[in-house]
Amino acid sequence: MASGRAVVRSGRESFNGRRARVARVAIVGSCITRDLWPILGEAPADLLYISRTSLPSLFAPPLTGVEVAADPPPGLARHQNNAVKADLRKSSLAALIAHRPTHVIFDFIDERFDLLAARDTLVTHSWELEVSGYLTQPGFSHARIVPRASSECDQLWREACAELAAFLRQTPLREARIILHESQWAQRFLDRAGQPQDFDPEVMIFDGNLGRLDTHNALLSRYQDRFAALTGAARVQADPSHMVGDVGHRWGLSPFHYVADYYRDIWRQLRDLGV
């Protein structure tokens, strides 16, 4: 097989006199959920998308000593800079409550990034943060990496997941339908000729930062099982036969940029849950 190393980069309305619940969707996750709308349908006007974060980072204090530019630094789009800003300032949870979602969809594909312990807090060491230039600011002086596959990171994540479950119960989000979009990094992909090929066991998360495919799939399985057990979330997962990468994907080749049948499968399940 050819080698395939990839860069991983409430409301109501009235209809005919009846009151019908209109979905207000929030995503805490990654492109595997957000891309359902542009790939298979039009995005809802009131979709909230929180990305490039980790549960330990969501529940940590804001990082001081960093100024985030109003205009994106070179190399970042506005939405990418906004995601970094939200992770540094810890504004995502307030935005989630303010959105008043009827459905909150979680996926944990963005939990591939290491954490950074900086001052008295944690942030997500995403590609966007890496290229933003913010790492040179005083807030990151003496910051240390907490590797994603380390026991320290695992313990931080477990504690944050318990905190998230309590947060969902104790805030207005208890009225929302909580959905877990379960997934795995694909082992194989379809090449330009539509032929199956194997991904390399090591995937470049971003320049110089490698992750093992089997290690991250094991992490995802643990994360997903713990989250579902603590929250009682409805679980949706594509048929394993659809968990295949696509070299022609709009975002390029990656173990979690899947063939179209993957998104169709998840789309049908979410529609059944009222999304």
Image: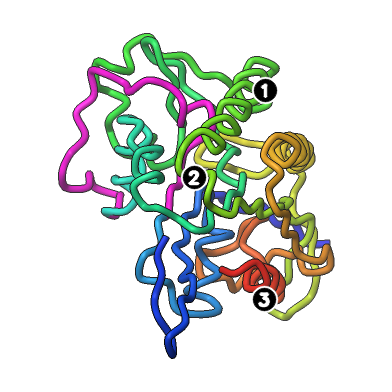
* Crowd rating for badge 1 (residues with CA inside 10 Å; few <14, some 14–19, many 20+): some
| Numbered mark located on residue 154 in the image | 1
Q: Is residue 175 left or right of residue 84?
A: right
Q: Which SS does the magenta portion mostly show? A: loop
Amino acid type at mark 1: Asp
Q: Residue at x 56, y 32 (%)?
A: 164
Question: Is 113 left, or right, of 219 in this rendering?
Answer: left
Mark 1 or 2: in front is: 2
Is disc 3 placed on a helix, strand or loop? helix
Q: SS for tag 1?
A: helix
Q: Position of residue 217 (x, y in %)?
A: 76, 42
Question: x and y percent of residue 226 in the render?
Answer: 73, 34
Q: Position of residue 53 (x, y in %)?
A: 47, 38
The residue that label 2 is drawn on is 173
- What's the magenta region? 49-77
Residue at the front extreme, as displayed: 17
Crowd rating for badge 3 (residues with CA inside 10 Å; few <14, some 14–19, many 20+): some
Determine which residue is flagged by label 3. Answer: 264
User: Of the residues shown, which amino acid type is indicated by label 2?
Assistant: Leu
**Which numbered disc, 1 or 3, marks the residue that appears first in the sequence?**
1
The N terminus lies in which quarter of the figure?
A: bottom right
Image marks 1 and 3: residues in contact by CB distance under 8 Å: no
